[in-house]
Image (cartoon, rainbow, N blue to C red):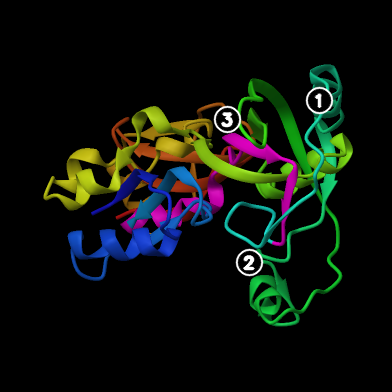
Amino acid sequence: MHGFLNINKPEGMTSYDVIRKVKPLLPRKTKIGHLGTLDPMASGVLPLALGNATRVIPFIKNENKTYVATMTLGAVSDTLDAWGQVSYTGQIRFQEKDLRNILKEFTGNIKQFPPMYSAVHHQGQRLYELARQGISVNREEREVVIYSIELLNINKQLDLPTVKIRVDCSKGTYIRTLCDDIGQRLETGALLSNLIRTRSGDFTIEQSYLLEELVDGTNIEEHLLSIDYPISGIPALSIESPQDIDAILNGRIINTSTQLPDGMVRVYANGHKLLALARSSDSLIKPERVFK
């Protein structure tokens, strides 16, 4: 079984919990990979690569994400979200114009410190393992890109006001850190109280499947996206010669008269079956991943 499975992960499960649920539904020894984990408190798009699709992952270029996040103001947390040890700042007053200006400040190339409760490694240990021992260590700032932040809603009717935003960002962006940083600038404090990933690269929540839909006995193959689905932006080459097809399948270089840019290409047999991902250079096609 080969292809991508776009799962809408429920809140309260780890990404690996999802894999454990899906694995018994697949043929034995099927390889499974993912395109970026989701925190247990988050729900939304979790694409899984099955079989040969795992070999495509290194060639996926579109790794940007979209999140809908709700942050609660007037409170902070050691985990930067509502699942941690929460304390209250006593500051809940703010002006909408100030919030909008602050959101603009966090748009573009910004730097973030990975939160202590994260899977980043430090001297052979995950940061969250150290955090659970009460240990805090210095972390290096990482540059990420926030393409846009849209203010969706402000709710001041609750004891603690909430702000809902939509964030388009690069891979590696910590939305928990973003909310905490916004809260600091607003001088109210803030923590992430709800998070939905609505897009991961080319995978959207509209085309995703709830985990219970898959576990309840449906045919998973009916829900699979093709292994070339997330790499459609890579130029394609169709070959028809049996000799060329045999050469590609056996990892040998072929020559083509088709004008192609230097770089990665998708190679198909007669325009239908994906044979390989290959590197094009001066009309020479060298296979790097072969799909037999």
The label nearer to you, 2 versus 3, is 2
Q: Which amino acid type is marked by label 3?
A: Leu
Badge 2 is on which residue?
119
The residue under label 3 is: 260
Q: Earlier in the sequence, mark 2 or mark 3?
A: 2
- SS under mark 3: loop
Question: How crowded is the residue under tag 2: few (<14 C-alpha within 10 Å), some, or many (20+)?
Answer: some
Verify whether residue 73 appears in magenta.
Answer: yes
| Element type where label 1 sits in the image | helix
Mark earlier in primary sequence (2, 1): 1
Dots 1, 3 in contact, CB < 8 A: no
Q: Residues within 10 Å of mark 3 (few under 14, many from 20)?
A: some
The part of the image, by quadrant, that contains residue 170 is: top right
Looking at the rendered structure, the secondary structure element under dot 2 is loop
Q: Amino acid at mark 1?
A: Leu
Q: Amino acid at mark 2?
A: Ala
Q: Which residue is mark 1?
A: 99
Write the start and end of the magenta stretch as one range: 51-78
Q: Is residue 145 visible?
A: yes
Residue 244, position in %: x, y? 37, 45
Q: In the image, 212: left or right of 8?
A: left
> Real-space Cα distance between discs 2 and 3?
40 Å
Residue that appears at 14% across and 49% down: 216
